[in-house]
Amino acid sequence: MMEPMEHSVTDNSDESTETAEVTQDAETSVPSEKTADGTALSGKKARKPIPYAAAFLLRLGVTAAVLWLLLTFVVGVYVCHTNEAYPMIKDGDLCLTLRPSVPKTGDAVVYRSEGETCFGRVVALEGDIVEISGEVLLVNGENVMIPAVYPTDTEGSSINFPYTVPEGCIFILHDFRSDTTDSRTLGAVPLKDCQGSIFFLMRRRGI
């Protein structure tokens, strides 16, 4: 006697669920966009590329802003048009300065005097006593060893020595010591008029 065949019933609930999920995803997904060359962009929303001209102008603007900040607050660019700092700095030389730096004795600096840009060397700081005896420069009673080709004298000076450098000022002499339009005539130079210490010099003539 033959046993009745059992009919297996296939449970299609899992397959139905997966099919429903796939259908739902297909309905809710955003169609991919294509670029001008036909390349498909994946994702829900494609980003539009920045035009070349706009990107170039943006980079140019950022570069200009950085240069402006550097030249305004950090680095100063000056061209010497005199021989007052000769022989270290000659007429036509390009000088770069660090603006925030506090000058030290012996530093070559750029400073403003009576509306003009000048070039000199710091020989004394605030509180120092400057004396010029004959052709010898003394600061606080000691001989100052600063590289100067020309002798230092008081001829043409309008201040009296010994001279005490006031607070917030520096005493500047020109390397070309025959030019006395420095602190010997002006007195001490306020720090606010100092444009910074020279850290780079480029000869622009005779190259």
Image (cartoon, helix red, strand yellow):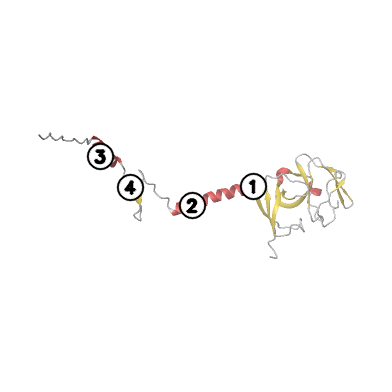
Which residue lies at the image location 70% right of the left edge and 43% below the top edge? 192
Closer to the observer: label 4 or label 3?
3
Residue placed most toward the observer, 95 or 91: 95
Name the residue that disc number 1 marks: 74
**Mark nearer the viewer, 4 or 2:** 4
**Label at residue 57:** 2
Question: The residue under label 1 is which amino acid type?
Answer: Val
Three-letter code for the amino acid on which mark 3 is drawn: Thr
Split into 4 quadrants, where in the image is the N terminus?
top left
Q: Earlier in the sequence, mark 4 or mark 2?
A: 4
Residue 107 appears at what percent x and percent y?
75, 49
Q: Earlier in the sequence, mark 1 or mark 3?
A: 3
Q: CA distance from mark 3 to mark 2?
A: 51 Å
Residue of label 3: 19
Residue 158, x across and y down, in percent: 83, 48
Q: Residues within 10 Å of mark 4 (few under 14, many from 20)?
A: few
Three-letter code for the amino acid on which mark 2 is drawn: Leu
Decide which of tag 1 and tag 4 comes sooner along the chain: 4
